[in-house]
Amino acid sequence: MANELQPVHRTPNPLQSKQWSDTFRRIAKYSVQRLVVLFITVVIGLYITVLIANQGGYVDQIRKAQIRESVGQMMAVNPEVQRLTQSQIIDIQQREIALEEERLGLHLPFALRSVMYLQQAITLNLGNAEYMTSDSGSRRVRNIILERLAPTLVLFLTANLILFGSAILIALFLSRRYGSFLDRAVVALTPTSAAPSWFYGMFLILLFSALWRMMPFGGMVAAPPPSGIHYYFSVAKHLVLPIAAIFLGAIFQSVYSWRTFFLIYSSEDYVEMAKAKGMTSSMIERRYVLKPTLPTIITSFALTLIYAWQGQIILETVFNWPGLGRLLYQAIGFNDIPIVVGSTVIFAYLLAITVFLLDIIYALVDPRVKVGNGGARA
């Protein structure tokens, strides 16, 4: 047929391609700048931590005393050394002590030592722990910390994702039923969020573990650890009470705050206009209530997440959870300085990553924010 329809060939729009290229370049530049700023902030915080942990060189004096004691013990059990004269033994001992101090950088001035310790802390190259070991028997600080990182991420990311989704759904539900009995009950329960999550954890253990025998007292997995898929079921069972404690510690405050935001935006004129046009309630909530409140909600959730990182030390200790929080608590008790510094480094990295992701997500969900160009708004 002469009039047969021919396929339409769309030519690429050079203007649109240039806009995408400019946007990608601007986001990449902004991301690099934010990473540099956050890294500098982390470095400054870690340097202060190194100075405090070393107590102005006092810890170095303790390490020197430990070196002298260790060298003395090794020489005391060496039969070849016993054949030497006293002056020869002293010379060998002093030489071994000097070599060990030089290996650890203890012969350098304190200012140079602190910079060297900072470099080691940033890379988690902190050598061996003084007293603690990992579950696999390693004394390397990096191995001990990385072994405890995964349980912490599993617990707190799972708990806070459940908290985030549940709080949004409940807040939307209550905003549609403002003044109802359930709405007033949530408002009345909001002050209970002032108690930390570990406080609720103790009551949950008392009820569900000690009294009703429904849940384990603590830990991450049953002993001895099951194999196969039963291992994951055991982990999931041990996650229930810690997640419930985190949930109870923040849910009412989050729901109250976000419900207030939803009520404010649901009373705007453009929402009434959408209702007059006959749009469904779900579409109105999604487009005109939830979408404009997402930046504020995400900011609030990020602050809650940062608070959760800080409060996990006691929570993991209460539930005997083998994570970074419990590791730091044990290291403080043993005065194991390398573990304390290494745990602080990981927490600093986690906080920096949280802030960085918040900036990126904030720019994605809020069309008014234009990253780059000095943070100018579109």
Image (spheres, helix red, strand yellow):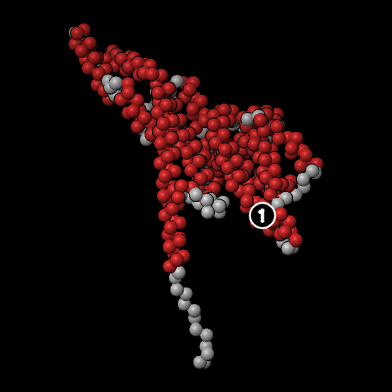
For the image shown, how many numbered marks are present on the structure? 1
Q: Is residue 331 visible?
A: yes
Q: Is residue 71 above or below residue 122?
A: above
Q: Which residue is mark 1?
A: 288
Q: Nearer the viewer, residue 276 or 69?
A: 276
Task: From the viewer's perspective, tell me whether residue 125 is left or right of residue 305.
Answer: left
Identify residue type, mark 1. Tyr
The picture places residue 207, in percent across and down from the top left corner, at 70, 30
Task: From the viewer's perspective, tell me whether residue 172 is left or right of residue 51.
Answer: right
**Can you tell which quarter of the image residue 194 is in?**
top right
Label 1 sits on a secondary structure element that is: helix
Q: Name the outermost residue toward the top.
A: 86
Question: Residue drawn at (42%, 54%), measured in percent from left and top?
Answer: 25
The picture places residue 68, in percent across and down from the top left corner, at 31, 15
Question: Residue drawn at (24%, 21%), measured in percent from left and top?
Answer: 99
**Can you tell which quarter of the image residue 187 is in?**
top right
Q: Is residue 371 above or below residue 100?
A: below
Q: Residues within 10 Å of mark 1 (few under 14, many from 20)?
A: some
**Can you tell which quarter of the image residue 183 is in?**
top right
Task: From the viewer's perspective, tell me whether residue 95 is left or right of residue 11.
Answer: left
Question: Residue drawn at (69%, 38%), measured in percent from left and top?
Answer: 252
Q: Name the outermost residue toward the bottom.
A: 1
Question: Residue drawn at (63%, 48%), measured in percent from left and top?
Answer: 293
The picture places residue 300, in percent across and down from the top left corner, at 60, 41
Q: Nearer the viewer, residue 358 or 220?
A: 358
Q: Is residue 43 above or below residue 74?
A: below
Q: Nearer the viewer, residue 83 or 255?
A: 255
The picture places residue 12, in percent across and down from the top left corner, at 44, 70
Q: Is residue 346 visible?
A: no
